[in-house]
Amino acid sequence: MNWLQKIMSPRARTQNTSAGKGKVPEGVWEKCGGCGTVLYRPELERNLMVCPKCGHHHYIGARARLLSLFDEGSTQELWASLEPTDPLKFRDSKKYRDRIVAAQKSTGEKDALLAMGGKLKGRPLMAVAFEFAYMGGSMGSVVGEKFTRAAEKALADRSALVCFSATGGARMQEALFSLMQMAKTSAALARLRDAGVPYISVLTNPTTGGVSASLAMLGDINIGEPKALIGFAGPRVIEQTVRETLPEGFQRSEFLLEHGAIDMIVDRREMRDKLADLFGLLTKAPRAA
Amino acid sequence: MNPNFLDFEQPIAELEAKIEELRHASNGQAFNIDEEVRRLREKLKVKTAEIFRNLNSWQTTQLSRHPARPYTLDYISVMCEEFHELAGDRAYADDGAIVGGLGRIGGRPVMIIGHQKARDTKGKIKRNFGMPRPEGYRKALRLMKMAERFGLPLLTFIDTMGAYPGIGAEERGQSEAIARNLLEMADLKTPIVCTVIGEGGSGGALAIGVGDRTLMLQYSTYSVITPEGCASILWKSGEKTKDAAEALGMTAPRLLELGLIDKVVREPLGGAHRNPQSMAVRLKAVLLNQLDELAAMPLADLLERRYQRLRGYGAYQE
């Protein structure tokens, strides 16, 4: 599934699939969303889901992302047992409870944020990553709590913190609980800042809404992945509000770089080296090999 | 139908019109209508209480957006002995959707920041319907830091549908502006009391809403998304707005029950717009009380409590 299908409404996606357009057998082959080349999936995975032909960044799951970042065998997953509850007994067209069960089943994750501690080129690092496939990577109480614990642990251990965001924003089914996670995670980051513990935010496709307007934009350094959609309001909402067509490339990483919102754009294949270098400098450590 | 009244307020409008008519008719007349007016007034009171006793969440939402509801500057004009508005973010512009400045309340110097809406068309445009752009949040931040520097407590008034979703706002970093305020407010070395006076719309509200206390007026709302937005995303139907309002649990009593706010400030019979003066006086007393409590706390305790309070938001299991 390419990024465009990912951010489309489920209904639009279903319609598209039922039309059978450009369908390739699930699992083994993947059609590149950038250049259309049919790619062998195991090879694509070895390449961190980046198209070897055109460099298009396909979606990568949170677990694969984190494991590719750390030194092999150095990682420990943290707070894996945190699970959502349903404080409001929220029910829209479906029950929130049922949505949780379905998301847990389809992703194998308890909620939309994974946290791992480990080593990056021999140095301690705390990392979290959003799982977009879990309810659009939305931030509810579990995401907020896990992020806050990661920040607090980074503070206690004096280890650097990195976050990979991929999210539509707040989780509506947790209503004001979810909004308050913005305040909670930002408060934890304030403590990190005051203590001089470095935090790098990597914004991947997509990063919007309440996450973009809190923890994702608060890095000492903000990094975008190529062509990632990053913004406060979603493009559709803006289009409906201003009633004009949005400019080409609006809210993409390149646009944000040009407007001064992020520090740099980094290719996923070079992310590990870049992060090791930046953290090395911020902590005044010698350059890691 | 009187446009200054919501649909469910119409019986109130009719009774008020009747009273007004009678008073008008009796002008200079010899016959006595006092008894009739008194009877109607009593009826009006009973009727209003009856309507307001059983408001649903959607009706409360409508009240929180009531065209006659008092706005930030209305409260300031009643509550403050003096107020000096301060403009601009020193980088780009002055945003009319957020007002702020130095004021004196009950003899006490404070910094005040609030969303500002307007009632007439020209004002609405100037205030951008109360929807701030990044420069509004950055002006707010500038004033917060000033409050910190001079040791002034900060009072904020929340009343926005949300941050403005526009092209320019995105270009100038709407996300960053909101995020920055959340971080700075969590850490601001002065007491902060936030009051939702109307609509508490998502990140655009929270960006001036992090502090030591969160109060809500009785008929204000606070939500992660508008009921309209929620209905269109989750139900894919604009007709489910009422259901969405209910599901989001966005009213003051409900949020108090959930432990997400600290206090509900009672409104006059029929809502703040029926008696803005008495609403402002009551709110002033509550705020002064809150400020006294917070001023008694050593700064380190205040900040630690604030952190633990923010830290405590959430419902999860493990």
Image (spheres, coloured by chain):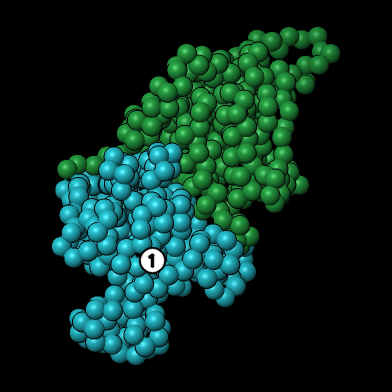
Chain colours: A cyan, B green
> In terms of image quadrants, where is residue B198?
top right
In the rendered structure, which amino acid carries the disc numbered 1? Lys
Q: Residue at x 54, y 59 (%)?
A: A261
Residue that sits furthest to the right in the current view: B28
Query: Residue A174, position in %: x, y?
Result: 33, 46
Query: Residue B78, position in %: x, y?
Result: 68, 21
- Is residue B165 shown above or below B282? below
- Is residue B178 shown above or below A119? above
Q: Residue at x 30, y 67 (%)?
A: A289
Q: Secondary structure at mark 1?
A: helix
Give the residue at mark 1. Answer: A274
Q: Is residue A26 visible?
A: no
> In terms of image quadrants, where is residue B170?
bottom right
Residue that sits furthest to the bottom in the current view: A37
* Image quarter of the C terminus of chain B: top left
* Image quarter of the N terminus of chain B: top right
In this rendering, position of residue B30 left or right of residue A6 = right
Query: Residue B85, position in %: x, y?
Result: 72, 32
Query: Residue B203, position in %: x, y?
Result: 48, 46
- Is residue A236 shown above or below B314? below
Q: Nearer the viewer, residue A184 or B121?
A: A184
Q: Nearer the viewer, residue B132 or B241?
A: B132
Q: Residue at x 49, y 47 (%)?
A: B179
Q: Chain of mark 1?
A: A
Q: Residue at x 58, y 52 (%)?
A: B164
In this rendering, position of residue A142 left or right of residue B143 = left
In this rendering, position of residue B307 left or right of residue A254 = left
